[in-house]
Image: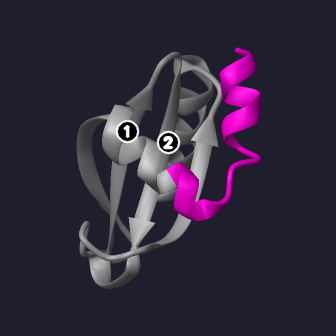
């Protein structure tokens, strides 16, 4: 839990470096014609949108979810909004 709190205060470059080294990529999905990559790090989850949807580029946006319930709530909310 303490690491999760500290991770969100890392610089964007440090967050990405940590994700690439210690995170597990769970997969990707498409939202609004953009590809979103989902990582698991310790007990939390991070969604990343890369520039030009290219995983080798720098990220445009990171969204951190404190736990699986938080991630599921967000995904359900997006799913309901798509109809």
**Closest to the observer, 82 or 67:** 67
Where does the image place residue 79, in percent across and percent down from the top left?
A: 45, 47
Where does the image place residue 43, in percent across and percent down from the top left?
A: 52, 16
Vertical relation: 53 (above or below) 66: below
Circles 1 and 2: CB atoms closer than 8 Å: yes
Q: Which residue is mark 2?
A: 46
Q: Give yes or no for residue 47 being in the magenta stretch.
A: no
In this picture the colour scheme is one colour
The residue carrying pointer 2 sits among few (fewer than 14), some (14 to 19) or many (20 or more) residues within 10 Å by Cα, namely many
Where does the image place residue 49, in percent across and percent down from the top left?
A: 42, 66
Q: For the N terminus, which image quadrant?
A: top right
**Residue at position x 66%, y 38% in the image:** 7
* Side of 12 where 27 appears, left or right: left
**Residue at position x 69%, y 49% in the image:** 10
Q: Give yes or no for residue 8 being in the magenta stretch.
A: yes
Vertical relation: 83 (above or below) 32: above
Location of residue 34 (image quadrant): bottom left
Q: Which residue is mark 1?
A: 39
Which secondary structure, mark 2? Answer: strand
Residue stretch in magenta: 1-15
Secondary structure mostly taken by the magenta-highlighted segment of the chain: helix
Q: Is residue 72 visible?
A: yes
Vertical relation: 43 (above or below) 20: above
**Closest to the observer, 46 or 29:** 46
The residue carrying pointer 1 sits among few (fewer than 14), some (14 to 19) or many (20 or more) residues within 10 Å by Cα, namely many
**Closest to the observer, 69 or 64:** 64
* Side of 32 where 45 appears, left or right: right
**Residue at position x 52%, y 20% in the image:** 68
Give the mark, 1 or 2, whose residue is nearer the N terminus. Answer: 1
């Amino acid at each position: 839990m303490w690491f999760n709190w500290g991770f969100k205060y890392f610089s964007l470059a440090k967050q990405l470096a940590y994700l690439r080294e210690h995170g597990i990529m769970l997969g990707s999905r498409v939202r609004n014609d953009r590809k979103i990559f989902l990582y698991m790090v310790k007990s939390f989850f991070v969604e990343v949108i890369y520039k030009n949807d290219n995983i080798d580029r720098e990220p445009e946006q990171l969204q951190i979810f404190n736990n699986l319930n938080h991630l599921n709530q967000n995904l359900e909310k997006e799913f309901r909004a798509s109809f």
